[in-house]
Amino acid sequence: MERQIHILAADALAEEGLEFIREQPDTVLAHKPGLSAAELSAIIGDYDGLIVRSGVQITSEVLASSGKLRAIVRAGVGVDNIDVDAATAKGIVVMNSAEASTTSTAEHAFALMLALTRHIGHAYVNFRGGGWDRSQFSGNQLSGKTLGVIGFGRIGQAVAARAIAFEMNVLAYDPFINAPTMLDGRVKMCKGFTALLPHADILTFHVPLNDQTRNMLSAETLEHCRQGVMVVNASRGGVVNESDLLAALDSGVCGGLAIDVFETEPPPADHPMRDHPRVLVTPHLGASTREAQEAVSVAAAKSLLAFLRDEGLSGAVNIAGFRVDLDPIQCGFVDLARRMAQLIGPMITAGIGEITIELQGDDLTAAATTIERHTLVALLSGHIEADINVINVRQAAERRGIGLRTMTLDDEKNDWRQLSITVQSCGTERERRIVGRIYDDNRPRIVEINGYHMDMIPSGAMVMIQNDDRPGMIGLVGTTFGAANVNIADMAISRRGDTALMVLKIDDEPDDATLQLLRDQCGILKVAKIVLAPLLEPSSG
């Protein structure tokens, strides 16, 4: 019987997403909005996946007994209500369904910009109060103005496209985009945030809240802005400094502020922005459309189930670049990486200082993060005490001061794909290095171990022996295994200087006494036994 996937929806979600989950034959849904933190903590470990919106706080205390929980998905953009570090430490992937609300959020930001420049909100309030003072609400057109877009992801680009349709000039800044222009040359990219500020009549923010973006617009950066700059923030509260903006509004440095998000939500009843004459406020309505709520609910359900079924990973915020939808070649290198890490692991007898992973082959670049994580899990499982998986292994390594580097190489001289793992011991120059390849027959091979060159398929029970390079050593090893009734199925031998390395594939695992007998022999320097998973034979079709 197919294993059932148990999902907990702990928040109010659009019915379309809930119904999608209910329709799945392998899925059991529990919809329990309104649970207290204690109630949620008591049951969260019974579920494979959790879906929330912004109404539930997923704290480290809630995750203390996470049990079999593998994934949390936020039906929406921000994950401010989820302790991502705590989830990562528990090996739980955190996702969001940001793409589904792109259009609604971009439209709302643009609506705020229009309403701000034409004083629509205050004019409406004035009219409802019996007024008709047209001169008091004279505004500015958008055409011909310069819009500065901070954060040029999906939403930032959608806002920019609408601004271009309104005949605005558009500049943008995004630290993760190196191109000089975007949107077919219609948007000029600035090299720094403060470099953009003097040129913009209106600023609009579309960035996540983190240590780099917190208080991005403050008294200090406002000094670089044009006098009377208009500001729109429909991203996250805290990206703009509310106190500094209020002072800038009063001094005229800022000509107007349209804001949909606050540092504390809801803001207190006496918050000065509630009745400021130059502030237009909406209560976090960016994704509050029927279409967006349906879309984020369904998208959250689909991405959660795809991950739990090992079919794909999208919207992950704590394992960027990790993929499960790999092609056969990439899957082959994930398997090779695990085998290589298990082979080199017994050679590491001191603390690990640094791990370097090098990949050669264009089609491996997209799988680099996935290969890295699987390598680290296989390599570190026997060297650190924590329970680790592909979600938390990098965090666990970094907390222990282990340096991590993963590089992709482009070597046009060689047409093969290659993976190398180098481990450097703490405080020394001592390295352990292993190199593997996959050729056209799609079978993994070890081609180098610590400078010893060979060609060996890593599978099953194996023994590595380093010995003095002198006559009689092969016979000594063969006689010892023969006496123990252990058959040697294959052998690779490589020489370097005055030593040699034998890598043996054996039909039966030798016992510890046999291995110790080998170690005690003159000329035998090191002996290590490794048992790898058997290699699946290629399908004959």
Image: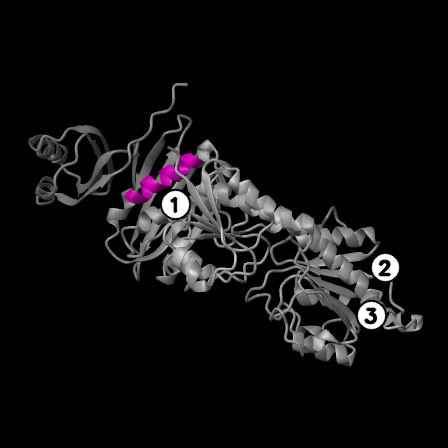
Corner quadrant of residue 279: bottom right
State yes or no: discs 3 and 2 in contact (Cβ < 8 Å). Answer: no
Which residue is the extreme one toward the top? 541
Disc 3 marks a residue whose amino acid type is: Val
Q: Is 213 displayed left or right of 163 in the figure?
A: left
Quadrant in which the N terminus is drawn: top left
Q: Main secondary structure of the magenta part?
A: helix
State yes or no: discs 2 and 1 in contact (Cβ < 8 Å). Answer: no
Residue with the mark numbered 2: 144
Mark before the other along the chain sequence, 3 or 1: 3
Q: Residues within 10 Å of mark 3 (few under 14, many from 20)?
A: few
Q: Is 263 displayed left or right of 426 in the figure?
A: right
Residue with the mark numbered 1: 374
- Label 1: which secondary element: helix
Task: Report the residue at 30% width, 32% height from top.
Answer: 457
Q: Nearer the viewer, residue 219 or 421?
A: 219
